[in-house]
Image (tube, coloured by chain):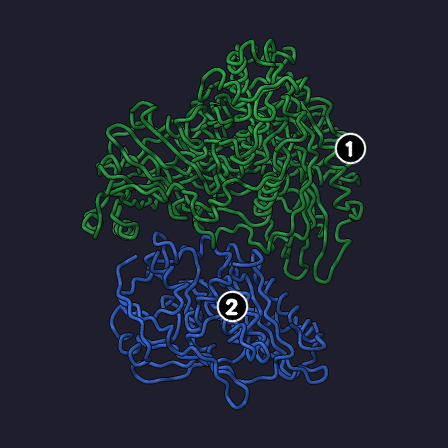
Amino acid sequence: MTPFLYEKVSERGDALSLGTHPGAAYLGGGTNLVDLMREAIARPTLLVDVTGLSCKIEEDEKGGLRIGAGVKNTAVATDRRVRARFPLLAQAILAGASAQIRNMATVGGNVLQRTRCAYFYDDEAHCNKRSPGSGCDAIGGFNRNHAILGASPACAATHPSDMCVALAALDATVSIDGPRGSRDLPLTDFHRLPGDAPEIDTELRSGELITSIVLPSNGFSKRSSYRKVRDRSSYAFALVSVAAALELDGGRIKNVRLALGGVAHKPWRAHVAEAALAGRPATEAFFAEAAEAELRDAKGLRDNTFKIKLAKRVIVDSLVKLSNAKDAPR
Amino acid sequence: MSIVQAALKKAIALAPDSWIPGGSPDPLIRERHGHVGQPVSRIDGPLKVAGKARFAAEFPIEGLTYAALHYSSVAKGRIVEIRTSEAEQAPGVVLVMTHRNAPSLAKAPAFGTNPKAAGGDDLAIMQDDRIHWNGQAVALVLAETQEQADHAQSLIRVDYEVDAASTSFEQAIADGTEPGQFMGEPLKLRIGDADALFATAPAKVDATYRTPGHNHNPIELHAATLAWSGDELRVHDASQAVTHAAWTLSQIFGIKEEQVHVTSPFVGGGFGSKTLWHHQILGAAAARLAKRPVRIVLSREGVFRTVGGRAPTEQRVALGARRDGTFDAIIHTGVTAMTPHNAMTEPFIIATRSLYAAKSFRLEVDTVKLNTVANTFMRAPGEAVGTFALESAIDELAAEIGMDPIELRIRNEPERDPTQGLPFSQRGIVAAWRAGAERFEWYKRQQRPRSVRDGDWLVGLGCATATYPYYRMPGGAARITVTRDGRAIVAVAAHEMGMGTATAQTQVIADRLGLSMDQVKFHYGDTSLPGIVLAGGSQQTASVGAGVVAAHRALVAEMLKLAGNDSPLAGLHPSEVGGFDGGLCALDDHDRRESYASILARAQRTEISVEAEASMPLEMQHWSMHSHAAMFCEARVNEVTGEVRISRFLGSFDCGRILNPKTAASQFRGGIIMGLGLALMEETQLDERTGRIMNPSLAEYHVPVHLDVPAIDVIWTDEADPRTPMGARGVGEIGITGVGAAVANAVFNATGKRVRDLPITLDKLL
């Protein structure tokens, strides 16, 4: 680990002014950044501890929630309002990491966690994300956990968050503050596809700080589910995960949200499938057609081609189960 | 095998039983009211929960320095340049050691090349610029703190000249194989013409099974605290072979064996990995160079890079049977990997040598060499993966001929060892099958796959035989000291790796001496104590037991001499006397007795101390000695996702007498859990392009989490083996065997899909 300075701040203004310092990095729970520092992949010279900022969950008049970036993952997952109105989010958070990690990890840090690609973590491997222009060893190597959608010849890494998949499905917004003022971005636009600059994970600019996540109210609390498929029962990243939410009007689909995890460089909002389903009858045949359409451009690598089939199956199964659910499934 | 060895082996096989250790059963077997067989809690439990049990990396030494290793990033070649100046100037750095300044060291004697050799490989360590595998330590940094050492290590830069390396198992097989050897014997056995009988058999299966490489992951990281005083080396090690480690270090450093003192009072898991690897040797070399004591603790990545694991295998099993299931031919052949720098072949045919009767056998292990870290012993080397192939094939044959797989196994139960012709010392596998089948409600199993469904989950039952040999290696010894206050200290250079050795041995010794447990102290884990006792091959209990038997015999003889003619024991031969109620008594007349205190007082002695060596372990060549278990698994496979979940598991064991049901059950369950990992998830990802292990962490190298493990039921026959000390056989390794096949067979019963490549991941079932 490279030596660094550490400052804990209690005012956002202090955070922002320290955050512009070259080599500065904001520190949340440290469950990812500290690992990256230990492996000398991240080498910040100044850590600005922001865990004392934005630690509240507030509600708006319509029943939406604003979750402070410093709120711990466990606190979100156990919040009564979250569990009642956004059970999908609680499920997704609880599917991730371990209880100990969730107790430490913050919402803002979760959004900003970096890929778990083994070649990114190994300083001796070629990785365009860690060392731009050096090549990608994952594409010809072990890539079971890698992307089938939106990858580029430069990078096939996946975003590891479960929480963000639920946030993508729930139309969440990321509130940002920075040296040049504050702004909001839809979560689905916050993370980038790798393209030819995989070293840039998100649209966050230098010195900017996530301050909160905003969840608009919705009608999905009765029919939503997060299904995570992985290589062991707990403490493993998703091979494929599906956040699904459904609003029915009789036998027809009034509203549907679908997002996939473990398949792309970002939480993958399934816009194609959603568009294919809007207003259609809620039947397995239509679900299958929509899943097929969403995965039409999917490309497998040596070890992960099975994910294409798996993703389709889990999409269909999730939607079938949601449409059959009589009451709020939990 | 030489002619002399072969003749001796034959002579031992044919000798009368009474000439062989175990010829007259250990009198302790008859003892049914003592401590043996009681579920005694671990005597070191309170120390451990209070944090007072001191592990290798916790011994305080004045002036300690901390070590960090820098690993090579190429598999083969030589170091052209190694730039260390930045590291040398980093804060707190005491020393940077590379091949340019390391002290001169002899080659490490590799395990298996000498009775006391403990080296994971036979390389001359840090003596030249050669790279033998990707991950080999090429530099060691010593600093005042661990963090300083870790940081300085990251500043080292190395340029390599790269040679072509062999890093693909598949490619190496295509390039040609060599015959394998295990413990000096060829892994090759032919009886009859198996190929001809197989060709004409009316029922047959012929399939290839593959198992990947595995890495060791004991909770306690490999560590040592080392200090020199002149030419004397003190090592606090995490070791399952203290005497072996000391001898091997003495060879490497050119000093006398007595000049190396290794202690290892507590070990946080070994599984075959806690022998002598480069870190202890480099730690000692650096301590010598820096003239400071050294602590070296491998990181988890360091364990993956520098401590070997289980080699990959590709196995063919071909079974030829008659329509009634009787085996005519068993062919079990295949290839495993090793390295140019070790002598360890994963002997996957061992179980097949003794499990079933057949008219003919052809068993062969061939090897290829890979440029990787040396593979090594990992819980039931051979049997763990060999039984996956054999017991899967038997399940395939049972399905083929429409026979219950348990009945097929019992149909082929041998009367004598099927390949050696020796009588069995004790064999209760049929009883274990019957008891297990009843308890698991095996009768509920549907023979036809895909017959049982529970929501999205297809449910199946599978079973397999588990087996592990009884071993006892030469070198057992013990010292018993009895003091006038009627207490005893028994000292053996044995090991406590968490399995309960100290507890079980204290129980045994208390019964043998006729004392209570708190009157007995068991000293172990120290090279100053007697014996060459490896905590490996599930043999430590027998080895210590035999040493104690010998020392006890000597003690009784000495005590009888001291007791003299005025004792109620006068005139008795040592063989007629045993320990009872704080003293000695005639075995057939408990009223003829005298307490230790009384004998010592009369002789005006404060204590008596005897030391003796165990008999040679000839029993292994006179009888066929094996433990067995019947493993039962209920697996659920998700029809949508292919996910496998194990919902029930039972192990029904036949391992001789169980000395401590509590610690033995832990060993059985732990073995089964490791077996579930082998079946479902463990896999070392070796990138064939670079020879580098790409999942060197517990996040990426999957072992089961709690949620993957159901409540595991274990039962046992508790039938004593009359030919072993205490009637017991080892319990440490058998639990992992058979599990891979039991799971695969249950998955087949659930889904109709036969997975022959471990691990059984969901993509193979989609």
Mark 1 surroundings: few (<14), some (14-19) or many (≥20) residues within 10 A: many
Helix, strand or loop for disc 2: loop
| Chain name for mark 1 | B
Question: Residue beneath label 2, please?
Answer: A162
The residue closer to the viewer here, B223 or B396, is: B223
Query: Exactly how many numbered labels are in the figure?
Result: 2
Mark number for residue B325?
1
The residue closer to the viewer here, B702 or B480, is: B480
- The letter of the green chain is B
**Residue plotted at (31% across, 69% down):** A25
Up the image or down, B688 lies above or below B719; here it is below
Up the image or down, A297 lies above or below B226; here it is below
The residue closer to the viewer here, B736 or B685, is: B736
Tell me which amino acid carries mark 1: Gly
The quarter of the rendered structure image containing the N terminus of chain A is: bottom left
Q: Residue furthest bottom?
A: A61
Residue B429 location in percent, x, y? 71, 32
Position of residue B203 in the picture relative to residue B80 (left or right): right
Snapshot quadrant of residue B112: top left
Tell me which amino acid carries mark 2: Asp
Tell me, yes or no, if residue B653 can be seen here: yes
| Chain name for mark 2 | A
Residue B266 location in percent, x, y? 44, 39
- Display colour for chain A: blue
Up the image or down, A300 lies above or below A14; here it is above
Tell me, yes or no, if residue B179 can be seen here: no
Position of residue B527 in the picture relative to residue B430 (left or right): left
